[in-house]
């Protein structure tokens, strides 16, 4: 179901960049004085083999890691899975290296020689210079049988999987989307056309000049999904953002596409939630279609920014008919407490507060005793108070001219309505996120590997054949 490929070309540009940017932290080379070869030599010395003479000549091709079963199982999930790793050595003598390291032949399987360090331990296999290992003997033997039958991984499969993605990355992965769609967190949304259209996914990680690029492509069955079923509008054009140093800036080219998708997702996945019941009650009491008359108003670009701690934020959205929205706001304002309190029960599922009005702006978390005060002046804002959790304690929302704004305080609400916007460098697609990493040291420290960066720009592009996410990290 899942295949991961990692370059072993340790003398190539990708490994050189990885070691300079990240690798030293893993091997404890704090001063940066030792080379990759020096550290690798020390690492392999304890196993009785020489890095330069024994190991390095074997390398150069990608090591392929195949995961059978539930790929999330390897990350601590409940599903069962096993893995198989294979490397076609480029030179050297893999069997001599294994025996030098103390591994002994332990029989044959489908023409391959099996090796083990001690009887009962994990097995390794070597055939025609190809090295294989697995955490499960049955998986290893099945792989050898597939190899003999000519049913293993081939270049045509890789070419198809990574079409339109970087050609020589440090690491890449691909797989079928079905196992992911079957996860409990996603299975509840199975009725959505987008989930039914999922086919495959592919990911690449690549260093390029002073950037680290991550590209993800999720392929869709075009016969099962229309543009209206997507979480973003289609096309390469990216929205501009309100740039705030030290803040997370976001943008959406057509916010209503996203909010309408999220509402449908909530109704499909959480039909009995308080939020869905509150939205249904508004429709019945006011005689309106919540999606068409409210959410579809926000069909222009939106822009937002939020502080790393979530305490302050502001967002603005262009709306289709400002006067119509201005007229309906007093009717729905009394129902806002029920809506936002309904989101409280969904917080653990990752649903953000007020996603209806600012899906690209994270806001407050759980809340209680929500209260809505109407504007005190003709150009004033609705004030929502009673918010608790790690986000802001109150929100201000309303129309400034033809723009709808929502913010953690009145000053920010007025300021973002007039704020200039700029293009996010390298962004492509309707959804954009930009972060100043030099001001987000705490967030950077939470990454699974240490890396010093200046800027992060992430964007998402949608079509009926593919969802494409791009992440660029400008490195120091």
Image (cartoon, grey):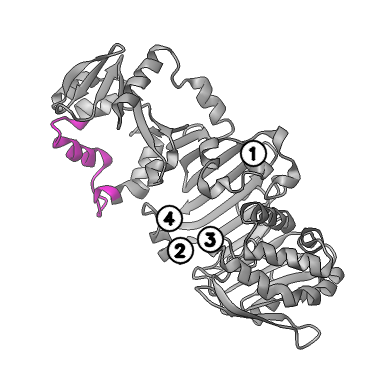
Residue 262 shown left or right of residue 311 in the figure: right
Pick the quarter of the image with the C terminus. bottom left
**Residue of label 1:** 196
Between label 1 and label 4, give the one nearer the viewer: 1
**Residue of label 4:** 476
- N-term mark: 3 or 4: 3
**Residue of label 2:** 438
- Residue 371 is situated, as x and y percent measured from the top left of the image, at 65, 81
Asked if the residue at tag 2 contacts the one at tag 1, i.e. Cβ–Cβ closer than 8 Å, the answer is no
Asked if the residue at tag 3 contacts the one at tag 1, i.e. Cβ–Cβ closer than 8 Å, the answer is no
- Residue 286 is situated, as x and y percent measured from the top left of the image, at 82, 69
Q: Residue furthest front?
A: 272
Q: CA distance from mark 1 to mark 3?
A: 33 Å
| Closer to the camera in the image, 302 or 199 | 199
Residue 192 shown left or right of residue 324 in the figure: left
Q: Which mark is residue 435?
A: 3
Indicate whether residue 54 is drawn in magenta.
no
The answer, for residue 171, to whether it is visible in the render is: yes
Q: CA distance from mark 2 to mark 4?
A: 9 Å
């Amino acid at each position: 179901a899942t295949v991961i490929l990692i370059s072993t070309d340790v003398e190539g540009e990708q490994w050189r960049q990885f070691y300079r940017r990240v690798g030293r932290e893993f091997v404890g080379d704090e001063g940066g004085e030792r080379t990759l070869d020096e550290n690798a030599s020390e690492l392999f010395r304890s196993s009785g083999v020489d890095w330069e003479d024994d190991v390095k000549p074997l390398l150069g091709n990608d090591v392929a890691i195949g995961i059978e079963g539930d790929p999330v199982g390897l990350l601590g999930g409940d599903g069962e899975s096993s893995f198989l790793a294979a490397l076609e050595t480029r030179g050297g003598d893999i069997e001599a290296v294994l025996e030098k390291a103390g591994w002994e032949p332990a029989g044959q399987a489908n023409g391959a020689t099996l090796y083990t360090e001690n009887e009962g331990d994990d097995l390794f296999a070597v055939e025609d210079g190809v090295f294989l290992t697995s955490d499960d003997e049955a998986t290893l033997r099945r792989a050898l049988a597939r190899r003999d039958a000519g049913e293993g991984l081939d270049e045509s499969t890789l070419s198809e999987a990574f079409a339109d993605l970087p050609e020589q990355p440090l690491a890449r992965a691909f797989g079928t989307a079905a196992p992911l769609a079957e996860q409990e967190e996603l299975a509840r949304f199975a009725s959505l056309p987008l989930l039914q259209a999922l086919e495959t996914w592919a990911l690449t990680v690549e260093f390029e000049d002073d950037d680290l690029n991550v590209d993800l492509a999720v392929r869709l069955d075009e016969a099962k999904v229309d543009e209206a079923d997507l979480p973003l509008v289609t096309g390469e054009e990216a929205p501009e953002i309100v740039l705030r140093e030290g803040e997370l800036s976001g943008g959406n080219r057509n916010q209503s596409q996203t909010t309408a998708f999220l509402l449908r997702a909530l109704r499909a996945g959480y039909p009995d939630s308080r939020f869905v019941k509150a939205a249904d009650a508004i429709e019945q009491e006011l005689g309106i279609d919540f999606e068409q008359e409210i959410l579809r108003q926000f069909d222009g670009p939106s822009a937002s920014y939020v502080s790393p701690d979530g305490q302050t934020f502001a967002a603005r959205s262009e709306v289709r008919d400002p006067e119509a929205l201005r007229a309906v706001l007093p009717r729905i304002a009394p129902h806002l407490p029920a809506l936002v309190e309904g989101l409280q029960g969904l917080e653990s599922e990752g649903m953000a507060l007020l996603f209806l009005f600012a899906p690209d702006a994270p806001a407050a978390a759980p809340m209680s005793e929500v209260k809505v005060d109407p504007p005190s002046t003709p150009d004033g804002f609705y004030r929502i108070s009673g918010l608790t959790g790690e986000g802001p304690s109150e929100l201000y929302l309303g129309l400034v001219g033809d723009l709808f704004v929502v913010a953690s305080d009145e000053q920010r609400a007025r300021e973002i309505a007039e704020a200039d916007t700029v293009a996010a460098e390298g962004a492509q697609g309707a959804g954009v996120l930009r972060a100043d990493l030099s001001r987000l040291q705490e967030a950077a420290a939470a990454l699974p590997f240490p890396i010093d960066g200046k800027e992060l720009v992430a964007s998402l592009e949608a079509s009926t054949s593919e969802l494409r996410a791009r992440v660029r990290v400008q490195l120091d």
